[in-house]
Amino acid sequence: MVSCGFAGKKCDYCVDFLPLQYNQIQLPLKPTLLILAAGMGSRYGGLKQLDSVGPSGETIIDYSIYDAIKAGFGKLVYLIRKDIEEAFKEKFDSKYRGLIEIDYAFQGYELPEGFPDSVERAKPWGTAHAVLSARDSIDGPFAVINADDFYGAGAYQSVANFFASHPIEMNGKTQFALVGYRLQNTLSDFGSVSRGIGVEDDDGNLVAINERHGVERKDDGIYYQTEDGNMTKVESSSVSMNFFGFSPAIFPELEKKFKTFVAENGQNPKSEFLIPEVVDQMINDGQADVKVLKTDAKWYGVTYKEDKPKVTEAMSSLVSAGDYPTPLW
């Protein structure tokens, strides 16, 4: 018997159809969820990836996995640092073994082959390097999320639908997706943040991602800080929260661009190789089309320790509304 794989249950489609036809059709490959969880949590003051925010002790990661399984994802890859592997396995492994395939990938400080190992860093190389570090664990379509961000169930379903309805390549370009949030739904009340501000064309394709720092809400709007220290008003409604839908076609580009990045920035211990910048380059070079999957959902994250009570309250409200059970499993 073939199962849809959610909580060990068999849906009507699996029960009534697949036993007769399973050997005669090619089932689509279920997408992988890559959770970027190697961050240091310097502004938060600890391992926020493992901090509880749900009424039964659930972490944000737990809600992300729950939503992904419901949306049809078939594999889970944790991208972590080696030094937190034991804590991660103790926290999550027993919950999800048997519900979804699980793998681990590790992000370190290694330089590409041919570069001298002479750079001292206090933290890993950034989110694009994190995705590159997981390449041996991924062989099909995959979504990338941050471990400390709550995206909402609809985001996972929209990416799963994108994978099901779009080819890997079209018109000579790789096809990617980005879940686009409204900027006002992604800010912290306790300090400034960095955001990738999206620019779209009339067809809903991403034209560019402009990384903005020092983004914060003021009385007359939302502003970011320019390199010269001035504050400039943001004129955009769609931002990247690092929820992307990719194919393995991105890995050769990540590898090539990381070498270029290290050659230009390797001696700066604070430099970061970031996903939005790689995607922006691929769009500009005519290598990729990126469909923006817009959502009005409220994003929740724990950039600062002071953010946690608000996230905890939000999760409690979602449980009370019937959006999630408690405990989740």
Image (tube, helix red, strand yellow):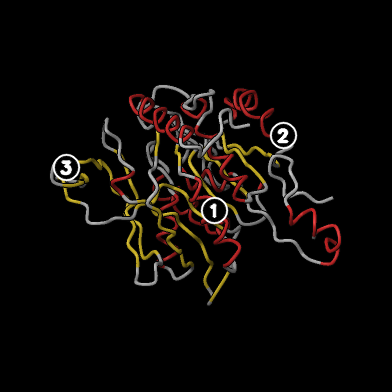
Residue at the (56%, 48%) spot, across then down: 132
Give the amino acid at mark 1: Gln
* Residue 17 location (% of width, % of height): 80, 60
Mark in the foreground, 2 or 1? 1
Q: CA distance from mark 2 to mark 1?
A: 22 Å
Quarter of the C terminus within the rendering: top right
The quadrant holding residue 67 is: top right
* Residue 298 location (% of width, % of height): 38, 44
Q: Which residue is mark 2?
A: 97
Closer to the camera in the image, 30 or 87: 30
> Which of the two discs, 1 and 3, labels the residue nearer the N terminus?
1
> Which of the two discs, 3 and 2, labels the residue nearer the N terminus?
2
Q: Tell whether 305 sits left or right of 174.
A: left
Q: Residues within 10 Å of mark 1 (few under 14, many from 20)?
A: some
Element on which disc 2 rests: loop
> Pointers 3 and 2 in contact (CB under 8 A)?
no
Q: Which residue is mark 1?
A: 157
Closer to the camera in the image, 101 or 194: 101
> Which of the two discs, 2 and 1, labels the residue nearer the N terminus?
2
Mark in the foreground, 3 or 2? 2
Give the amino acid at mark 3: Gly
Q: Residues within 10 Å of mark 2 (few under 14, many from 20)?
A: few
Q: Tell whether 236 sits left or right of 241.
A: left
Give the amino acid at mark 2: Arg
Q: Which residue is mark 3?
A: 229
* Residue 280 location (% of width, % of height): 40, 60
The quadrant holding residue 89 is: top right
Q: CA distance from mark 1 to mark 3?
A: 40 Å
Element on which disc 3 rests: loop
Q: Residues within 10 Å of mark 3 (few under 14, many from 20)?
A: few
